[in-house]
Image: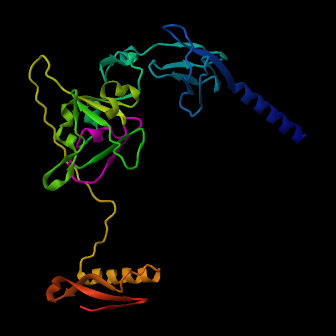
Amino acid sequence: MRQKFFFLWVLLVGCSLVQAQNRVTGVVKSQADGLPLPGVSVAVKGSSVGTTTNNNGQYTINAQSSNTLVFSYIGFLPQEVAVGNRQQISINLLADERMLQEVQVVAFGEQRKRDVTGSIASLKAADIRANTAASPDVALQGRAAGVQITQAGGTPGGVVRINVRGVASINSNAQPLIVIDGQPVNGSAFGPGGIAMNPLSEINPDDIESMEVLKDASASILFGSRAANGVILITTKKGSKGKPKFDLSYQQGVNSATNRVDFIDNGADYFNILKRAAANNVRAGLAPQSTNLNMNCIKIQEKSQILFCCCPIMVKIFVIFDHC
């Protein structure tokens, strides 16, 4: 008797679960022309359940009657629809006119975003101000798809390596062409003492209106082979009509090394390392051509004064005799 009640309870629970899960299908189209939209994201709000539309704009998803479906697509306004008891939900998405009317700088001028066919990553002044960066190129890090920014060191204004869509070559220079207000910038500059510096570090990030990264062949229309590694277009701010406005900003930061290397701080350790290196070479069969190997001999005097002199060190198999 108990087994019969148990099986009956399992059957009722299974029926309730089947009724709770609805198989929802539909078609997503554009409100402007009525064409189906492929690749539209369809997700259940507040959960990880989701799918995308096929080439015909059709989708299928399992959802409960109390759920809400969220439709989102690049260039269109997102839309939410309650499921209820419906098994078919078809909607028309409205184009995001504000996004499509944005102006982007391209190699041969300016175009509206809706008319741009190339691959361009854009960064506006508000995005640059939100990122505390010492130079404009560092502000692109993590904000432009396919762009890798690497700082060679912690020196203020130091060299920054930029790779657009990966490293194209190991030996040759893979830096993109940088153009500021229509003028190409030399990517290599040297500061006092011959130290390599970043030329963009001289530009105040607050003076930049927008930055565009041209990542495809459209960049070579105007700049030719120099744009083989991509182009970064920087547009600075210009004067506008109205009352004068003054802005003041102050930032500070500290860079610390992630891995500190222990350097040799005395002559004795340096001399012992030289002897050990010579002995290891002999044991490995890498004996020098001559048994008399001239090395820097180090004499340690009082008060840790180190004097360097050149003296012969007799190198023999497994044994090293040093004479100073």
Front in this rendered view, residue 13 or 195:
195
User: Does the magenta stretch mainly form a helix, a strand or a loop?
Assistant: loop
* x and y percentages locating residue 56 in the rendered image: 62, 16
At 24% from the left edge and 84% from the top edge, which residue is drawn? 297
Q: Residue extending furthest left?
A: 244
Span highlighted in magenta in the image:
134-157
Instruction: For the C terminus, give its image quadrant.
Output: bottom left
Number of numbered discs visible in the structure rendering:
0
Q: Residue extending furthest right?
A: 1
- Quadrant of res 1: top right
Front in this rendered view, residue 17 or 324:
324
At 34% from the left edge and 84% from the top edge, which residue is drawn? 275
At 25% from the left edge and 38% from the top edge, which residue is drawn? 136
When the figure is inspected, residue 289 is found, relative to residue 323, above or below; the finding is above
* x and y percentages locating residue 12 in the rendered image: 79, 30
In the image: residue 62, left or right of residue 28: right
Q: Is residue 151 magenta?
A: yes
* x and y percentages locating residue 29 in the rendered image: 55, 13
Q: Is residue 193 magenta?
A: no
* x and y percentages locating residue 292 in the rendered image: 32, 86
In the image: residue 312, left or right of residue 278: left
In the image: residue 112, left or right of residue 299: right
When the figure is inspected, residue 288 is found, relative to residue 8, above or below; the finding is below
